[in-house]
Amino acid sequence: MNRRKVWALLTVLGLAATSLLLAFLSLSWNMVGAASDGPAAITDIQSLDTGFAISETMFATDGATSGSSLDVCGDVWVIETVDSAEDVGTSTSLALEPTYPYTPHISYHDVTSDNLKYARLSGTTWFSQTVITRGGQSTSLALVPTYPHTPCIAYYDQQGWDLRYTCRDGITWTIQSIHGGRAGQHGTSLALEPTYPFRPHISYYVPWSDIATLFHTYLSGTVWMSGTWAYEQLEPLLSGAGRWCSLALEPTYPYTPHISYQDNTNHDLKYARLSGTTWLTETVDSAGDVGWYSSLALDSSGNPHISYVDSTNQTVKYAWLSGTVWLSETVDSRGLSGDYGTGTSLELNQANAPYISYYDDSNDDLKLAYLSGTVWITQTVDSEGKVGQYSSLALNQVGCPHISYYDATNGDLNYAYLQHVVYLPAIMKNWSPT
């Protein structure tokens, strides 16, 4: 490693001290792959110089440094089949454990048997199980943030015509019925408070003819899975507002809920947040038939960001709150009709940059878009057959994207990710500056 590369490295990392320079001059970089992301290895400095070299741009854009190691994302999508038993993989919801190796958990619907299923990666093997039989559409999964990261799922039970909530206690799933009237049929969204008792919050739409509006509910108890469900109605009865809702909680107490959703009567994208004991609602976008399949995320300052489908113009759009003004822009304009399952899924990385997964129904492909500066970069994740419906996106702590989705050609649940790579320093023997 010559001095020019060393100084470029120090410039990106913001390290100016002479002592740190001397430390880096004595290091080369070796790469090891994260266990759950698949193995990868570069074992010597010659490999770095002639093969997979670390570039200054990788330091600047693709990773985060921690101590004397560097975490980055690879540039080749790895695609796995999670479940191929029968026709499975609609209504997917993905969550990653918060620490290395960022184990993925997925809830999804078995179309053939009409069952709610759950899958988890253990080492390099996917294990799946049936949570309930004859039910389980519109699933939304969240993990308890502390070990053992208990999975919890909100879902619509089409046999009981009600919204239900379940968590796995060891090997047993405890199920609670929450709200009838086909509650959750057109989308549910679940989030857990980050501290004990990890109180669940769920947003959902009740389409029943004399209700037709958006609700928020939470479990009121002070002990895990205890208490009663408290209901809050956000829009007037028969308003038609609340489809394709997405819920996020602020990370600090009182864990204020924020919700994006579609007003199906006026065909607008709307947003609601709780202020004290009052829900405040506002229109985000009203240009055309918009707000389909919204996905909401909060940035580090608590500001909302929303991805959604504009059915009129057949585009994926992105909106964010700037001060008191909502701004929006087109992400991809390649023939997205808003057909059922088109979907969007939004996540923000640690720098608050948005990433969006979605189904491109003009090409039957799974796509990912991310904002680089002021330019949206789109890439095809999977194009083998008709793939990408019901996608669910999660980013690990490094910012590497992971996506669960439905392979309609084969009737499978698929999982795609960019490999997480860790560069570790290794002392270079018999080396001296030149």
Image (cartoon, grey):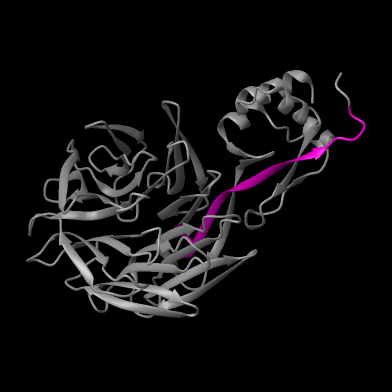
Q: Nearer the viewer, residue 177 or 149?
A: 149
The image quarter in which residue 80 lies: bottom right
> Mostly what secondary structure, the magenta segment?
strand
Q: Nearer the viewer, residue 91 or 64?
A: 64
The image quarter in which residue 314 lies: top left
Residue 280 lies left or right of residue 317; in this view the side is left
Residue at (81, 31) in percent of width and height: 26
Q: Is residue 365 visible?
A: yes
Q: Is residue 410 visible?
A: no
Residue 159 lies left or right of residue 421; in this view the side is left
Q: Residue 383's x, y, as percent?
A: 51, 48
Residue at (70, 20) in percent of width and height: 7
Q: Residue 25's x, y, as percent?
A: 79, 27
Q: Please tell me whether residue 420 belongs to the stretch shown in magenta.
A: yes
Q: Quick one: which residue is furthest to the right in this view?
A: 430
Q: Nearer the viewer, residue 433 or 294?
A: 433
Residue at (26, 54) in percent of width and height: 245
Q: Quadrant of the N terminus?
A: top right
Please say if 278 is above or below 31. below
Residue at (32, 70) in percent of width and height: 222
- Could you tell me how many numbered marks the image carries? 0
Image: magenta residue range: 405-431
The image quarter in which residue 332 lies: top left
Q: Residue 431's x, y, as percent?
A: 89, 29
Q: Quadrant of the C terminus?
A: top right
Q: Residue 194's x, y, as percent?
A: 40, 58
Q: Please tell me whether residue 358 belongs to the stretch shown in magenta.
A: no
Residue 210 lies left or right of residue 220; in this view the side is left
